[in-house]
Image: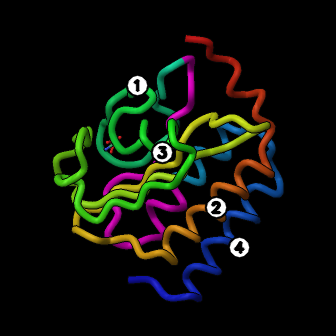
């Protein structure tokens, strides 16, 4: 498990990365890499962005993932539809969990809100049960907020379907 210094270091690195770039895709790609490399016991970290009623795979680190998830489906779709972070200690007991990577045992999904709408989610998976604490959730929510503040989201509108 990481300690408070690691968390501050992760936040500082994210701030530094995003202070010099406003492209939302570039920042999402580096943030996924930063989380994947910076947190222990994480087997997938990445973004899904909203396109109509679906979430479509964005920048990530880890094994190949499902490309499209309906709003309300799985942990990601539940976070997007409810607008609430989902911190799931045991993915096998979450009704409708979508097993992209069979190694995943616990999951944390944070919705990304812009102008009153959920525009996507930031999803972190772990190969061990109960990996994510309330403090981990707060950290990932801070990182998501940083990405939203630091990024020009118009890069995401390159895609329409
Ligand atoms: N497990 C997620 C799907 C995305 S992958 O974990 C990368 C879900 O149930 O929504």
Q: Is mark 4 on a helix, strand or loop?
A: helix
Q: Quadrant of ligand 1?
A: top left
Q: Nearer the viewer, mark 3 or mark 2?
A: 3
Q: Which of marks 2 and 4 is nearer the N terminus?
A: 4
Q: Where is residue 155 in the image (x, y as percent from the top left)?
A: 73, 28
Does the rendering let one see residue 51? yes
Q: Which of marks 4 and 3 is nearer the N terminus?
A: 4
Q: Distance between the residues labelled 2 and 1?
A: 24 Å
Determine whether, in the image, residue 161 is placed left or right of residue 71.
Answer: right
Q: Where is residue 9 in the image (x, y as percent from the top left)?
A: 63, 79
Instruction: Write the residue at 45% across / 64% down.
Output: 37
Instruction: Write the residue at 62% across / 45% down.
Output: 112
Which residue is denoted by mark 3 in the rendering? 79
- Mark 3 nearby-residue class (10 Å; few <14, some 14–19, many ≥20): many
Seen as rendered, the residue at the extreme top is 161
Q: Is mark 3 on a helix, strand or loop?
A: helix
Disc number at residue 12? 4
Q: Position of residue 17 (x, y in %)?
A: 72, 59
Instruction: Write the residue at 53% across / 51% down.
Output: 84
Disc number at residue 110? none
Q: How far apart are marks 4 and 3 (CA)?
A: 26 Å
Which residue is denoted by mark 2 in the rendering? 143
In the image, residue 55 above or below residue 99: above
Q: Distance between the residues labelled 2 and 4?
A: 10 Å
Which residue is denoted by mark 1 in the rendering? 70
Q: In the figure, residue 78 lies in which quadrant?
A: top left
Verify CB contact (< 8 Å) between mark 2 and mark 4.
Answer: no
Task: Give, as a single range, the part of the protein colored magenta.
Answer: 33-52
Q: Is mark 1 on a helix, strand or loop?
A: strand
Asked whether mark 3 and ligand 1 are closer than 8 Å, the reply comes as: yes
Q: Which of marks 2 and 1 is nearer the N terminus?
A: 1
- Mark 2 nearby-residue class (10 Å; few <14, some 14–19, many ≥20): many
């Amino acid at each position: 498990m990481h300690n408070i210094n690691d968390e501050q270091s992760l936040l500082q690195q994210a701030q530094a990365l995003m202070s010099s770039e406003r492209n939302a895709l570039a920042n999402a790609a580096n943030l996924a890499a930063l989380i994947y490399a910076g947190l222990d016991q994480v087997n997938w970290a990445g973004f899904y962005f909203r396109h109509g009623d679906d979430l479509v795979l964005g920048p990530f680190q880890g094994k190949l993932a499902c490309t499209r998830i309906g709003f309300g489906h799985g942990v990601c779709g539940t976070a997007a539809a409810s607008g609430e972070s989902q911190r799931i200690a045991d993915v096998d007991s979450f009704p409708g969990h979508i097993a992209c990577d069979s190694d995943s045992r616990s999951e944390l999904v944070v919705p990304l809100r812009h102008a009153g709408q959920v525009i996507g989610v930031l999803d972190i998976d772990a190969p061990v049960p109960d990996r994510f604490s309330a403090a981990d959730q707060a950290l990932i929510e801070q990182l998501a907020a940083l990405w939203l503040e630091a990024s020009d989201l118009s890069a995401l509108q390159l895609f329409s379907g």
